[in-house]
Image (cartoon, rainbow, N blue to C red):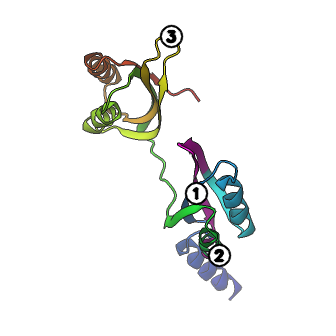
Amino acid sequence: MKQAGKQSEAVGSATRPASSDNHLLISAFGAPGNSPLVALSKRISDCGCNLAEARVATLGNELSVLALAQGAWDAIAKLENALSRLDRDGELRLTHFRTSARQPQSTLLPYVVEVIAADKPGVLFQLADFFEHQSITIEQLHSTRYRAMQTGADMFSAQITIGIPNTMHIAALRDDFLEFCDGLNLDAIMDPMKF
């Protein structure tokens, strides 16, 4: 009798998702003096969730935070309510929605691309378009404009992490990319990511 009970428990737990398989993606903007990271990480912790991933960046005069909270369904529901109250306070601009964990991509090879060029409209679009036409995913991107110290010219800089399918011929891709960059007068490199 006890053994049958254990078997039914094992079957039931095999079909039930893990209690921490619930995820909430949060985007927040606030003034640099009132860090959204502190407010968000406190609410996430207070609600019994974990901060699985976070990104922080200053864009314009705003501090932005992207956060992925993970926890049991009731902890995520509690966090959603806490974020709604925080949003109503008006100090932060917030959006959030439920999502799922990212599935590991064992078929993608991580590469880093760095580009520097004289700033002109459409550079980032042309880079993104090149990778999209090659069926290459952009995993992370950081781009900025700045003024060159010696000449005072407006410059563009981008650091891009891409996922290249492991079936793709890397040397041919690198040649195509560098030829593409030469045609646009972009200084660029493409190297494997170093862990």
Q: Is mark 1 on a helix, strand or loop?
A: strand
Q: Could you say which is closer to the camera, residue 172 or residue 78?
A: 78
| Disc 3/disc 2 C-alpha distance (Å) | 54 Å
Identify the mark nearer the N-term, 3 or 1. 1
In the depicted structure, whether residue 85 falls above or below residue 34: below
- Callouts 3 and 1 close, C-beta under 8 Å: no
Inspect the magenta stretch and tell me whether residue 192 lies in it: no
Name the residue that disc number 3 marks.
Answer: 150
Residue 170 in picture, x, y percent from top left? 35, 24
Name the residue that disc number 2 marks.
Answer: 78
In the depicted structure, whether residue 165 falls above or below residue 70: above
- Which residue type carries mark 1? Leu
Q: Is mark 2 on a helix, strand or loop?
A: helix
- Which residue type carries mark 3? Gln
Name the residue that disc number 1 marks.
Answer: 68
- Which residue type carries mark 2? Lys
Left or right: 154 as drawn, with respect to 45: left
| Disc 2/disc 1 C-alpha distance (Å) | 15 Å
Inspect the magenta stretch and tell me whether residue 79 lies in it: yes
Q: Could you say which is closer to the camera, residue 122 or residue 194?
A: 122
First to last magenta residue range: 54-80
In the depicted structure, whether residue 3 falls above or below residue 195: below
Q: How crowded is mark 1: few (under 14 residues within 10 Å), some or many (20 or more)?
A: many
Left or right: 163 as drawn, with respect to 25: left
**Quadrant hosting residue 123:** top left
Q: Residues within 10 Å of mark 3 (few under 14, many from 20)?
A: few
**Quadrant hosting residue 44:** bottom right
* Residue drawn where x is 45% and y is 22% of the image: 191
Residue 52 in picture, x, y percent from top left? 63, 54
